Amino acid sequence: MDKYDPANPIGSEEWLALDEAKQIELVRDFHAELDLEMPVDALSIHLSIHVIVENQLAMGVELIPETIAKLTRQGLNRHEAIHVIGAILSEDIFDLVKGNIEEFSPTKYRRRLEKITAKRWLKGKY
């Protein structure tokens, strides 16, 4: 794999065969073409979250493929759907790092994935 485009599905085996550094490089290359103005630290986190969500999708982690499909059926593109899942995941990671929670809860994560809709996301309610 030499190019990443989050708007298009990628082959799970091909993606998972790449090491993490290559995955991040491919995601970085895609975002560089968008000419986003983002602080380096924020971009690094953004790229990592993209890779985490793509890895979860490729591994078939419970509700990830279903959530991508649901959100795209509801009008979001695949890239936006990845951002939705990434935002949910990031919020839980942030709570963990800040000490607001003691451990990551897969149950809570699943509940939030089940609850999210494109409409809720667009209203800022996730």
Image (tube, grey):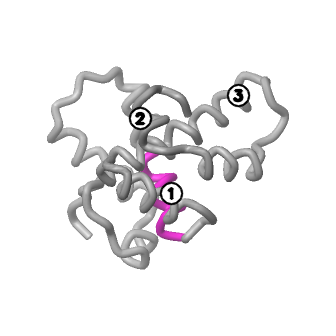
Q: Nearer the viewer, residue 7 or 98?
A: 7
Helix, strand or loop for disc 3? helix
Q: Position of residue 96 (x, y in %)?
A: 73, 32
Q: Nearer the viewer, mark 1 or mark 2?
A: 1
Q: Nearer the viewer, mark 3 or mark 1?
A: 1
Q: Earlier in the sequence, mark 3 or mark 1?
A: 1
Type of amino acid at the residue the image marks with label 3: Asp
| Residue identified by numbered label 2 | 44
Q: Residue at x 17, y 37 (%)?
A: 34
- Is 83 left or right of 29, judged from the image as shown? right
Helix, strand or loop for disc 2? helix
- For the record, the magenta segment spans 49-59
Q: Earlier in the sequence, mark 1 or mark 2?
A: 2
Q: Nearer the viewer, residue 119 or 106?
A: 119
Q: Residue at x 81, y 40 (%)?
A: 103
Residue at the bottom extreme, as displayed:
13
| Residue identified by numbered label 1 | 67
Residue 54 in magenta stretch: yes
Q: Residue at x 42, y 62 (%)?
A: 69
Q: Earlier in the sequence, mark 2 or mark 3?
A: 2
Measured Cα–Cα span from mark 2 to mark 3:
19 Å
Quadrant of the snapshot with the C terminus = top right
Q: Position of residue 98 (x, y in %)?
A: 72, 22
- For disc 1, the neighbor class at 10 Å (few under 14, some 14 to 19, many from 20) is many
Measured Cα–Cα span from mark 1 to mark 2:
24 Å
| Residue identified by numbered label 3 | 95
In the displayed structure, 7 sits above or below 40; it is below
